[in-house]
Image (spheres, grey):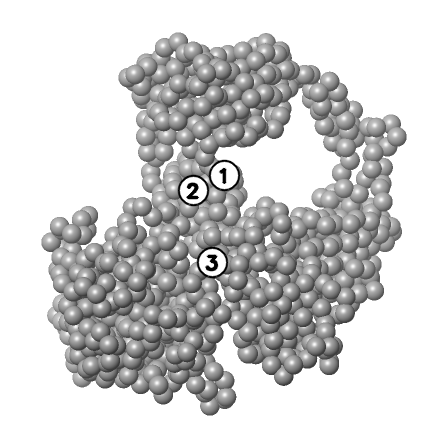
Amino acid sequence: CSNMKTDPKCMTNSLYYKTVVYIRETHNYMQTSSESAFMGDIALDEDDLRMFKEAHGSDGAQRHVHINHTDSDLSGCGGWHHPYVISGNFTGSQRAIFRQAMRPLGEETHFCLELNSFAPCRCCSYVGRRGSGPQAISIGKNCDKFGIVVHELGHVIGFWHEHTRPDRDEHVSIIRDNIQPGQEYNFLKMEPGEVDSLGEVYDFGSIMHYARNTFSRLGIFLDTILPRYDVNGVRPPIGQRTRLSKGDIAQARKLYKCARCGDSLQESAGNFSSPGYPNGYSAYAHCVWRISVTPGEKIVLNFTSMDLFRSHLCWYDHVEVRDGFWRKAPLKGRFCGDTLPDPIISTDSRLWIEFRSSSSWLGKGFSAVGKTPHSPALHTSLSSLPLQIERHDSCAYDYVEVRDGGSESSPLLGRFCGYNKPEDIKSSSNQLRLKFVSDSSVSKAGFAASFFKEMDECSGPNNGHCEQRCLNTLGSYRCACDPGYELAANRRSCETAACGGFITKLNGSLTTPGWPKEYPPNKNCVWQLVAPIQYRITLVFDVFETEGNDVCKYDYVEVRSGLSSDSELHGKFCGAEKPEVITSQQNNIRIEFKSDNTVSKKGFKAHFFSDIDECSKENGGCQHECVNTFGSYSCQCRSGFMLHDNKHDCKEAGCDHAVNTVSGTMSSPNWPDKYPSKKACTWSLSTTPGHRIKLVFNEIDMEAHLECTYDHLEIFDGRDSRAPSLGLFCGTKKPSPVVSTGNKMFLRFFSDNSVQKRGFEASYRAECGGSLKAEVKTKDLYSHAQFGDNNYQGGSDCLWVVSAEKGYGVELIFQVFEIEEEADCGYDYVELYDGADIKSPRLGRYCGSGAPEEVYSAGDAIVLKFHSDDSINKKGFHARYTSTKFQDTLHASK
């Protein structure tokens, strides 16, 4: 539906939207207001507020009044088409999170909703269906988290908070002394006539359940809700915001009267069958299967067995397949009898399969297999690729790879990870290949992309009606001019420009238009500098000041090696920071300056000079690598070699390496060529205290032996070869990743005098967490490996166990503490436990700058857990720990 508020199709059987007002400052919900909020994130309209007043009164006394809205007419799961709209002001990554959050809930109940970021209640929604129009969810600042969105969607389909159930006192205790003043109403208990749990047992794991410390007073994070011990003497965990629980799903299915038989299938391949297959199905059976795969993929459905009662038009027993995700999607076919249907291919990424029986005839039923073809249904162009993929300098772990064609061997257009959105991508033919890879460790939101057929509007005989040059763009085109010219007002013709041009001088200077005054708006200047063959051009910015922006979206200077706009990019620059000196990779360079129609600055002044590249002829006489410098050149050698006294040749070097960087790669001598014989090399890796080292093998090709007696690589869990061995490796089978227990790792490579192979290449990186030993000597612990240089990364989950010798305790003192602040520390936080695991008593959850200065364990261990989400990142923490004879029967902190 294009307009949720006016399209009649959207008004039928939908949910109603009203503006929500959340009186956050006073927390007084007794005052007159057209609308308000309840229990932190539940929207109340005028009728709700009136009933709330009657139920609880201004004196807070509880009176029995029905205020539940979950009893709407919610029949026919899947029988209604429930579209949704996401407000356009959200970013691509936020939209991806919303869709990801809707998906598990939408598999069970389908609903119409509108995601809005401007409602004053920040994170809230109504409970259950309202009126006959779209129903809104407010997703405000810091609410764009997967678990929060799923939680709010739970309210939309009719769920109250789990801890408000009438039977809650049998399962949890409310510790009222620990609740923030003014927030006690969030812990009210519903009456039996106010909410119906549809016979489902109390669900500690529900995504609708408060956490143990929700609305804890004074920022100390004491327990406000405490689960009662289960039969094993363990308190169940509560307050998860990771996924729908089995109880949530079961209750949603009951609430929306979904078919009791069937399932939601989201894997790339799977099978399903009628109930009782192959022993026969019962009369009046009704089952629904929904198959959903990644957008951009298709589903191929093959029936492998069919034995249903045959009737005219399959009127009685039948299985229906529909091309979509609801009962009224286009019909692909209705089948009965014993004839196997032809394979069915979906148009998009979803199929609806519904089975009904109404006869007493006994047949085997049916079985089917659904799978996703290997090639996604993509066309030739990709646009808007917001990323949230685990970061790595070379994208070695998680990444999305794009190739110019349909096969694994097609030219690589790019491998992407991290958070920076790539440029739009265009293929040279009618195919693109996307490959997404993730390892078994860190998970992120992923990526989203749009794809479409691309036409070259410039290929016609009229050159796109452009006077000089026509540039094809994704979905469109634009006119451009040769250097020294600029577009006229009609955006097609060209006229002489006040800047730019084609320059063949060996040296000179460049300035923005109007220098030293402010440059004019809407200028586009291109300089093309060309030097003689075997020369390189060096560009030096003397003054630089343009409108600043992190992504240089408005005014900027772009420098490329080459003369075209798609030549290799040296950099895109803006703001007030001077770029580094740039040297071209060939004998020409392109400088483009562009300004928009808003802010103007002084611009830039630069000079350039040309120098002959001695490396361009016979590699400068260097045996390995030649590096050009101004007025001269120098030779360098590959790993495992050193420069000879003649400054051109290379000879074998010492092979002992000390490595202190956070991440990088290492390889055997002479990699990727064969390693020399009789070689012994070592690598001593060291990283930030409190962190471990993870080594991942990219390739290995060494002489094979059952016990690796000959050529081998051995890894030790410490500073040298006296530490415990983590493994002895040889042959060609790539080992699993190797992780140290501490912040040091030692590698020793050995080759004998016989067979030589290519050797190995491996990547290493620092990883947080591990077991730490507290001693009398003070030791350091940092939140992340680059503490002090960069903020901590999003998506971190780290667990440290700090233990002392028996009879000693652990003293932990925070030197620096700066974590994203939030009232309940629900986003980024540090948790401390008084024991050797997270089942031990919790000492507190901390964020902001509110960590205790000193913490003492009651026993011989403390657990420190650090979590960060994918949004705001801060400086992190630095703590020092030591063992102490100070022992107390209870935890002590200062």
Q: Earlier in the sequence, mark 1 or mark 3?
A: 1
Q: Is residue 579 above or below residue 84?
A: above
Q: Is residue 157 visible?
A: no
Query: Extreme bottom residue here?
Result: 231
Q: Is residue 644 left or right of residue 474?
A: right
Label 1 or label 3, whichever lies nearer to me, is 3
Q: Which sits earlier in the primary sequence, circle 1 or circle 2? A: 1
Q: Which residue is mark 2?
A: 432
* Position of the C terminus by quadrant: bottom right
Rendered location of residue 312, percent (x, y): 12, 70
Q: Position of residue 726 (x, y in %)?
A: 73, 65
CB within 8 Å, label 1 to label 2: yes
Q: Amino acid at mark 2?
A: Leu
Q: Are marks 3 and 2 in contact (CB under 8 Å)?
A: no
Tag 2: Cα neighbours inside 10 Å, few (<14), some, or many (≥20)?
A: many
Residue for point 61% across, 65% down: 853
Q: Which residue is mark 1?
A: 413
Q: Which residue is situated farthest in the front direction here?
A: 59
Of badges 1 and 2, the one in the foreground is 1
Q: Disc 3 vs disc 2: which is toward the camera?
A: 3
Mark 3: which amino acid? Glu
The secondary element bearing badge 1 is classed as: strand
